[in-house]
Amino acid sequence: MSIPQKCLAAVLTDYGKPLEMREVAIPRVEDGAILVKVEVAGICGSDVHIFHGNLGIKAPPPFIMGHETIGRIVALGAGRDRDAAGEALREGDRIMWAHGDCHECYHCQILRKPMLCENRIGYGMAPPEKLMGGFAEYEYVIPRTKVVKIPDEVTEEEAIGVACAFRSVTAAFEKLGGINLADSIVIQGAGPVGLYSLVLAKAGGAGQVIVVGAPERRLELAKRWGADHAINIDETPDPAERKAQILSLTNGRGPELVVECSGVASAFPEGVDMVQKGGRYLVVGLTSPKEITFSPYALVQKNLQIIGSGGAIIHHYYRALQFIRRNRERFPFADIVSRRYQLEDINEALQNMQSGIEIKPVIDNRNR
């Protein structure tokens, strides 16, 4: 396959400033590496935080953003012939990949938690010459990165959420240890993390799932994906009123499980307040370091279990993709893609994601 020497990429030159379209060189494909043509790149809520420099993890600009990518292989480095599941890799295959963990440090080797890798190399915050961001025509996958093939029957629209939200939720529910049958579950947040949490809760046998969030467009999708009740925070801005509604739906006790997926710090005390005594609170969405005031006494008084989960590794990507493959007739996964943009329209897409207009906007390079 013919590979150009350069490609277009959207580069963040400084935090808070519009991304600039630049021509960047395509690196030589070293042993074990992979070069892909970007088919679809998702825009995540984390991208909005990265754009403004308030994610918590910062890198010096300039860099190419985008950490949710589906790429089609155009070149395989020597020795790279299998994915993480042992399936053969060939030019033309569609793949997805995790961040590059070292597999050598204490967290990788001893704790067996590579998502805490001390030497992790991430995608979406690397210098332009590395070509390690999805907001580009091509992307470079370094040798240490684990990849998985996307099942043939799964479309890009169905799969794109796995690149961040669904793999994170898969990891979180794995850490949770599953749910109890007939549990009442509240999902705080109706973005992609909340929607995929809803899916796993329904598939896991929840008695009822209540989604709390906004705007209405996201709540409508939550209902299509199986939410039993949806509470619009725009229409119910008072947390006390939201709690009253939830108590009325849960026999006055509150839900057995609350899953925080909103990314809003104030959701934490609200979630602790509404969960029933002896319940569990799974925190997935809080990526901002913003501080809140909270009394830990509530944890003891209610005898609660708090579980925090961040990141994922390659087997979570694989499991999420296989879940989609097996359940694509039950859940309309492709509906999460709210609009397709051209690469040159990246700033409009980011703005619309920030404003809440979009659920999951994507950069679509398939016709380039």
Image: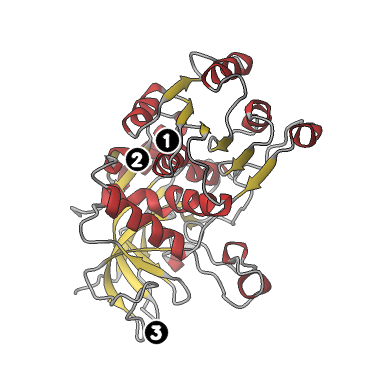
| Residue 321 found in image quarter | bottom left
Q: Position of residue 260 (x, y in %)?
A: 57, 37
Q: Is residue 220 left or right of residue 151?
A: right
Q: Earlier in the sequence, mark 1 or mark 3?
A: 3
Q: Residue at x 57, y 49 (%)?
A: 176
Q: Position of residue 328 (x, y in %)?
A: 26, 47
The residue that disc 1 covers is 353
Query: Split into 4 quadrants, where in the image is the N terminus?
Result: bottom left
Contact between labelled residues 3 and 1, with CB atoms less than 8 Å apart:
no
Q: Earlier in the sequence, mark 2 or mark 1?
A: 1
Q: Please say if 329 is above or below 93.
A: above
- The mark found on residue 237 in the picture is none
The residue that disc 3 covers is 31
Q: Please say if 348 is above or below 247.
A: below
Contact between labelled residues 1 and 2, with CB atoms less than 8 Å apart:
yes
The residue that disc 2 covers is 361
The crowd level at tag 1 (other Cα within 10 Å; few <14, some 14-19, many 20+) is: some
* Disc 1 secondary structure class: helix
Say which amino acid is labelled 1: Met
Say which amino acid is labelled 3: Asp
Q: Residue at x 32, y 81 (%)?
A: 81
